[in-house]
Amino acid sequence: MKALQFEARPARYAAAAAAGRLTPGAGAKVGPLRLRDLDPPELPGPDWVVIRPRLAGICGSDLSTIDGHASRYFEPIVSFPFVPGHEVVADRTGSDGSDRVVVEPVLGCVTRGIDPPCAACGRGDLGNCEHIAFGALAPGLQSGFCHDTGGGWSTLMVAHPSQLHPVPASMSDEAAVMVEPTACAVHAALTAGIREGDSVVVLGTGTLGLLVTAALRHFTPAGSILAVAKHPTQRELARALGADLLAEPDEVLRAVRRLTGTMALGDGRITRLTGGADHVIDCVGSAASLADALAAVRPKGRVTLVGMPGHVHVDLTGLWQREIVLAGAYAYGTEELPSGERRRTFDLAFELVRAADLGRLVSATYPLARYQDAIAHAASAGRRGAVKIAFDLRNEKERTRL
Ligand SMILES: [Zn+2]
Ligand SMILES: [Zn+2]
């Protein structure tokens, strides 16, 4: 089978990190990612099935890994070499496109054959599984970071049936490949505890920020949503998906001041607000975005960190003095809706992809052989007027053989 493989090669990480600092995405040229002919992964257990990816998206976390920015935190919870790709719509074996599935990639207790499951899996909070390095599989928090499962950037991978969600015949592959990132956004929006009329600032309007905006509007009783967008296409899409107000990154505090009527500190240029928004959802995860988030939220407000951060230097004095809550939002599992109803995040994501027509966010697709172009496009998507970039496996000739 044909696959992009990420190897444990420290010398290449260093080269990737150096290249990625100069040009985002350039790590694909010098880093540990290679196009290979591989033996298919063995089925890790009797229930497991072979699936053939159709489309597989490129996520911000993939780009960080390729450019060597990912934190060493991940070392014990991934297994090398691995095939990336956790945003996957695929065919079940032998099917002709009529039995399509979306992969829920988290490798929790059920996929690892661990019974009874940990408390988190028992509650349905798969993203919080305590056993992602144990059981019948090599360590790996998700398919696409685990040696044993393969990943979506290939013509074949294996999956546990509990990971597979059927795709309705009326849904395009482009819409279906948006379900996994949409599930991340739905979880972030619902885990933030937004109450009727709360003001919400969304920092970053790449794929994640746009999907969070759509999820806030569809599933929460948020009042005004202010989206912070750098590029014209992002602004248009953010408005179409539910943002009431838009701001450039260097105007965040001014816009929050207008939105909330708070007082400002600073001579001429606003350096601090005395109040702020009820919620900030940080979809970037950089030192600059976290500093903005802490400056834009009101005392006792909540910052939800959805973008993958890594090492960041940030002044927490404001968090302390203003009693701000800073919380992470990772992956998905089961959500509680404002009505009190509990639903699988993936079911909600399917609903949102359809309702908000999120398949339109897939801007370009590439064959595996053009992976360097694909990664470069994904790394500069906003500037190039694009959102989600994906690999298209549907025409790879290896797809029809093992
Ligand atoms: Zn992702
Ligand atoms: Zn578990």
Image: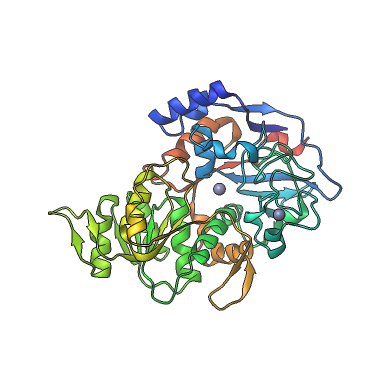
In percent of the image, x 26 and y 50: which residue is there? Answer: 250
- Residue lying furthest right: 46
Residues 358 and 122: in front is 122
Q: Quadrant of residue 183?
A: bottom right
Task: Indicate left or right for 125 with 264 as reference.
Answer: right
User: In this view, which residue lies farthest toward the top?
Assistant: 11
x then y, percent, for residue 3: 66, 33
Of 46 and 257, the residue lying toward us: 257
* Residue 58 located left or right of residue 122: left
Question: Can you give x and y, in whole percent of width and height, for residue 174 in the image?
Answer: 57, 52
Left/right placement of residue 225 relative to residue 96 reads left
**Residue 398 quadrant:** top right
Q: Residue furthest left?
A: 268
Q: Quadrant of the C terminus?
A: top right
Residue 365 seen in this snapshot: no
Q: Nearer the viewer, residue 362 or 222?
A: 222
Q: Residue at x 50, y 35 (%)?
A: 375
Residue 87 rendering spot, x and y as whole percentages: 60, 48
In percent of width and height, residue 284 lies at 42, 48
| 150 or 112: nearer the viewer | 112
What's the image's color scheme? rainbow
Where 214 falls versus 77 (above or below)? below
Residue drawn at (72%, 62%) of the image: 122
Q: Is residue 204 above or below residue 384?
A: below
Can I make out residue 123 in this image?
A: yes
In the image, is 294 to the left or to the right of 207? left
- Image quadrant in which the N terminus is located: top right
Residue name at image x 25 percent, y 54 percent: 251
Q: How many marks?
A: 0
